[in-house]
Amino acid sequence: MKRYFYLISLVLVCFWVSYLKGAEPRKVFHVKIDAPITPVIANFISYGIDLANKEKAEAFVIELDTPGGLVESTREIVKDILQSKVPVIVYVSPSGARAASAGTFILLSSHLAAMAPGTHVGAAHPVELTGKADKEVMNKIINDLVAWAKNLAQMRNRNETFAEEAVRKSKSITETEALQIGVIEIIAKDLNDLLDKAHGRQVFLGEEKRVLNLKNVRIEKIPEDLKTKVLKILTNPNLVYFLLMLGLAGLYFELSHPGSIFPGVLGAVCLILALVGLSVIPVNYAGLVFILLAGVLFFLELQVTSHGLLTLAGVICLFLGSIMLFGKNPPALRVSTPVLYSLVLIFSSLLAGITYIALKTIRKKPVSGKEGMVGKVGKVLKEIGPEGGKIFIEGEIWQAYADETIPEGEKVVVVEKDGLILKVRRKDR
């Protein structure tokens, strides 16, 4: 009997362990995006979608609040959503958030679209991505984006008219209007409310129809890793521009005052951080060249007597380069106008001030060494002639000689120093 009892107990334990293992709660992965759409954000979302597919999650939720961003990064995100084997829910949240410009395309591509009260979507008209694009080029860009938006809306059975008007006319609508005209499917006050309202809805993953089973799921938030956090900060164009200016100013101070060390080290670190940001954010290289040229012109002011013309040219180059640097980017990836003008004024004044101090130091009359004695006035202690004599100058007695005989008590001026012997002349009365 004991043998049968142990056998039955073992079977029951195995069954219970197997049951507990199979009873692991179903998951919904969640990421929060509250920044412009850049390659950094695209990589982060791609990582989240891959993880959700690998873990066979019930859904992947993108909580979105963005002013827009880069078209190419948006295309990468949309491709990942369309190819996902896990339903992707895009949720514009919290109240006051927006899915503007690039965010509109991401919302349209989602398997299920939702918005929180007090949010809006739209305004997807492109900026001039190639600088001052002519009318024909802009029409091609707009037509391309219109076709893309309408195609996404058609795939998800959403309002194609809005998709077109959001691009052509920068139309923007509230969450209530979006629900009424079929741009979104749900209005939810928070994430839990969203999952409750999404439960039981049908979505299409390619040709496959799937019913969302989101009751009693475990929400797993995917946190940003350190690399993403750092790059996200460094894709702020205001910060990148400030670091670039501070880096150039620090290096310029080191070059104009060799041996300072700290300004040079600080400048190098800031410049490296700025270059990391510039490697992510698209820049106009002509603008970057103008900024570097400004630094060269300020440095040349130290070497060439231009009476301030090189400094003026440097200020002009700095201003032009600053305007051009991010000028072709979407508004969310440009330096704000007040910040731009303020920093140009501050750093132009700073560089001009450093140049002035350096010039003043370079052109200052020497007060020590060989050159420092020339021009000093002394008094003859012992008659001076071609054969020599002695003078008293600044508390010291020096051997001296002159081309003429100068009697004791006369004042003399140093005209040359040769080792410890001074050549002098009679001081003009």
Image (cartoon, rainbow, N blue to C red):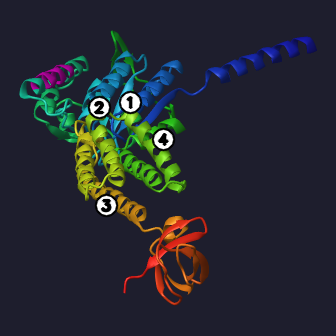
Residue at the spot of label 1: 39
Q: Which of pointers 4 and 2 lies earlier in the amino acid sequence?
A: 2
Q: Main secondary structure of the magenta part?
A: helix
The alpha-carbon separation of the residues under discs 3 and 1 comes to 35 Å
Q: Give the percent coordinates (x, y) of residue 9.
A: 82, 18
Q: Give the percent coordinates (x, y) of residue 391.
A: 56, 81
Residue at the spot of label 2: 70
Residue at the spot of label 4: 230
Residue at the spot of label 3: 349
Q: Amino acid at mark 4?
A: Val
The alpha-carbon separation of the residues under discs 3 and 4 comes to 30 Å
Q: Give the percent coordinates (x, y) of residue 45.
A: 42, 29
The alpha-carbon separation of the residues under discs 2 and 3 comes to 34 Å
Quarter residue 91 falls in: top left
Q: Give the percent coordinates (x, y) of residue 257.
A: 47, 57
Q: Could you say which is closer to the camera, residue 396 or residue 280?
A: 396
Q: Which of pointers 3 and 1 lies earlier in the amino acid sequence?
A: 1
Q: Secondary structure at mark 2?
A: loop
Q: Amino acid at mark 3?
A: Ser
**Residue found at x 46% / y 47%:** 270
Q: Nearer the viewer, mark 3 or mark 4?
A: 3
- Which residue, as the protein is rendered here, is positioned at the far left? 135
Residue 258 against residue 389 in the figure, above or below: above
Q: Secondary structure at mark 3?
A: helix
Circle 3 crowding by C-alpha within 10 Å: few under 14, some 14–19, many from 20:
few
Residue 3 against residue 183 in the figure, above or below: above
Q: Which of pointers 2 and 3 lies earlier in the amino acid sequence?
A: 2
Q: Amino acid at mark 2?
A: Leu
Q: Amino acid at mark 1?
A: Pro
